[in-house]
Amino acid sequence: MTVLLNEIQDLSLSNLERIADGHEKVRFGGPALANLHRAHTEFRQFVKDHPRQFIYGVTSDYGPNAKRQISAKERKRLRELGMPFIGLSFGDDYLPETKVRAMVFAILALFLRGGAAVSKKFAQDLAKALDGDVPRIPAGGLTSPGEILPLFYLMRLMPNPSENQLQASGGNTACCSVGMASIAAIEANRRLIVAQKVFALSYDAMQAPLEHIDPGLKPLWGDPYEARAIDNLSALLKGTENENRRPFQAPVSYRILPRLLGQALRASQRLSTTSEESLQSMVSNPIFFPRGSGSKVEAISTGGYHNSLLPQALDGMAMSWVDLAEVARRHIIKLHKGPVSHLPDRLVRDGDTFRTGRTTSYIEFVAADFIDEMRRWAEPSLLSAGEPGASEQDDINAMGYIACRNEARVAVLFDRVMALLAGVSSHALDVCSRAVPTNLDEFAQEIRRDFPPVSKKRELGKSAEKLTNRLTSAIQHGDSVLTKYIA
Amino acid sequence: MTVTLNNRQDFTLENLKRVAIDGESVNISQSAKKSINQARKSFMAYLNSDRSRFIYGTTSGAGQHASKRLTPKQQKEMAQRRNLVPPGGGFGPDNLPERVVRMIIFARLTNYIEGNAKTRSIEAERIAQMLDNPTPTVPLSGQVGAGEILPLAHVMSHMPRGDTEEAEPMARINGSPVSTAVLCDVALATKNRLALAYQIFALSIEAYQAQLAPYSASLLRYSQSRHEKQAIRSLRYWLNKASNTGRLPYQAPVSWRILPPVLAAAEEAFSTVRESAEISLQAVTDNPVYILPKGSDRLGRVISTGGYHNAQAAPAIDDINARYADLCTLADRHTMKLHSADHLPPNLAAPGGESYGTAMFSFLQIGYGEEARLAARRSFLPSSEGGGIAGQNDVASVSVFAYQKHLRSAFCLEASLTLLAASASQALWLTNRKPAHRLTPLLEQIRNLVPPVTKRTGRNLGNELESLQQHFEKNIVFNR
């Protein structure tokens, strides 16, 4: 299939995913091409009519030389020189192809609205470039004022600069953070589906009283996200046995689940909304407003390459992963603590002891390592205090890439903690010979494929690792019962 | 004046301001008292229908004794015995501001006003009466525990004396009114603090003679984000009718051009904290909570919940702290650039004055920025299970901890903006320029407390800057 771009609504997270992860083709539709042509023509006329007006990189030189005006002749000469840098970054691994493709989609989003004033051919060529391989971008050393460091690699996909016609911008925009954050938003949504299922499994394993998720709480708390968490947990636990549950309230870590999951749902929604709005508001420096798009026809310098809303949304998501992981750790410990859980102490089978290895006991230690690391990565992505460049111009870094990188790392660590809680909860239910609630049955079967209940000694770390990898893969690609939407 | 409370709809930020900042009293209306007493009656019928049923803190022990069931006699005795909340155990050098303690008392009443706290109306009246008495002192430190029992003990131990019956002692100290209060305080102050930030950054745009293009109305039409639009609109408001002549013929440094996106993130954080404050103010968060009778359900029901844990508060306050740190960074950069720009007098030194001019303002920014960044660290759920004896109270609420950092963060932003304001004022004075007309009152306030600097001899600039910061703070906290 091919994704056709014509209007702003086409700049959606679902289309981005089709192109970035599904490797579908992308093309500009007829109306879009007409608009592109009009914007490009208007821009060329605008520059002709305003030869003395400052238009960064068009009537001026770049970066540290921004204050130097250039003539049309000089512009041509500089264009023929092309970009002075091929690539400056290094370290760590390379960014996943999905994320690089998402960045390119974000540049196409900029083109679609006409602000870059590129020619039809230029835009079409970049779209077609996604039919093939994309450049490999090192995952280290990518933060700068704006997002030019990853752009140096992406520019390899663009037509030869010397052949370019006059345009406002080839992509000096927040394409890296918008593309990567959009992928993070899609994954966060699925990760949260998995998390709710895992916590529901733990809730049932603990036999926590259902009153903690009573729908009567929704109007009392008055928060739409907490209400959704209550609905989701209730749906997942539908049909579970209401008799013989704990005769008194469960530990705080169970009772506050709807409120914590509600906050995570809020964070996930915020990330989705911010990503999609950013995709639909791509601004470059400079940006041209052709007739009908701005308050007047103008070409202006902006800070459009700097997106501050996305780091905030990503940081919020990362914080929720940490808090949920912390609560998951409590669950893992409590499930093993017989006097608290009222389950067999250390989740051993009848007449057994943990020394036989036929239990998940001691695996509760493992989460601490992951959570400690998560806490460090989840500190906020603040504007860095240091001046990054050797010029007066480029004095503040954009934090989008750092926020994306950090959230992604926290998220993968979170999957490990979820795998541990899922394995332990499934084992707890098995030890007590209790059936899994109907709506969780399919999910639990998938969990047990990689992490079966422990009936004989085995390397549990391997089980947890296999399950983690499957959870992460399901979250990245979607098509799995693990991430199936909660009805 | 007195704020009259009829139901949960009356728990608004406006009413909270009247009580906490303007010092008004609270009156529980007759209709509210009737609702509360009706709820109490049905709750007692529910309790008496089966006194062996688990009702946390009423038919059972509390905290680590939750699993222990009490006989009807023990239930009555415990309720009568606990008619006084013991004073809290937290201590430390700083206290919650008095206004925040009044907010806690006001927010405490939400659980009561429609009867969900399952008490008699006299209990709500006693709480309201606390607003007419001296405000209790609540230490800022030592308030991180499961639920909000720790800070509430400091407040509710000052409740007027009186008898208590079943379920009433637990209702006094459960729920999450402290989170609500700190959220509300942050929301109210951030609104004014952001308004100040817009003005001072607009003044900095003027002082630097930066191009106005990055704040163009075209971007308003183009952006899909209401927060970006709000940021651009606010900057444009203060730059209204700003002169276009004499501005730089090329783009200003990044730190000026990215004002809209950075302020947009602050707007979004503010919008979140305000929404959370409004939701929390009207939320019934008691544990256990009484769900009122409805239809064929004659007696209602009591359920145990995690209402006492407000999961929105710390993340929302943390975001504000982070954005304050970012604004400090921008203010630092602007201050530095104003003192080193090619097109302005070096060091913003006056002719005939010391050559280093006001460059010290730029030095000073570093410390406030570093402090702000420290205060912006995340308030994660603590790893410690302190207090989780017997496995019950195993996760602590961190709202007060986030707020504690916020107070520092807020001061740092005010200090940083003060330094930028004084620098911008100096640059305009030295170049004999006037800012956009809406900025004139601000400039007058700045110059009233920190006059332009010709010579530093005989002047204590530290004192002058502090007086300007305090002037800003007073307007932020008390300006309605």
Image (tube, helix red, strand yellow):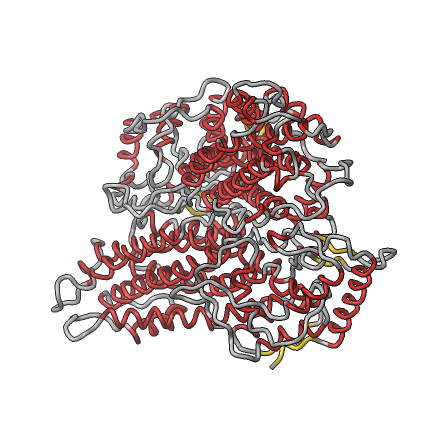
Residue A12 visible to the viewer: no
Residue B291 visible to the viewer: yes
Q: Nearer the viewer, residue B366 or B428?
A: B366
Classify residue B170 as left or right of residue A91: right
- Give the vertical position of A118 relative to B63 (above or below): above
- Give the vertical position of A48 relative to B102 (above or below): above
Q: Position of residue B248 (x, y in %)?
A: 29, 53
Classify residue A153 as left or right of residue B136: left
Q: Nearer the viewer, residue A134 or A439?
A: A439
Q: Which residue is farthest right?
A: B296
- Give the vertical position of A65 relative to B167 (above or below): above
Q: Which residue is farthest bottom?
A: B1
Q: Position of residue B114 (x, y in %)?
A: 73, 66
For the N terminus of chain B, the image quarter is bottom right
Quarter of image, res B112: bottom right
Please tell me which residue is depicted at 60% across the width and 66% down the height of the picture: B107
Q: Position of residue B327 (x, y in %)?
A: 38, 55
- Count of residue discs: 0
Please tell me which residue is depicted at 65% across the width and 35% down the height of the picture: A343
Q: Position of residue A270 (x, y in %)?
A: 56, 45
Q: Nearer the viewer, residue A388 or A285?
A: A388
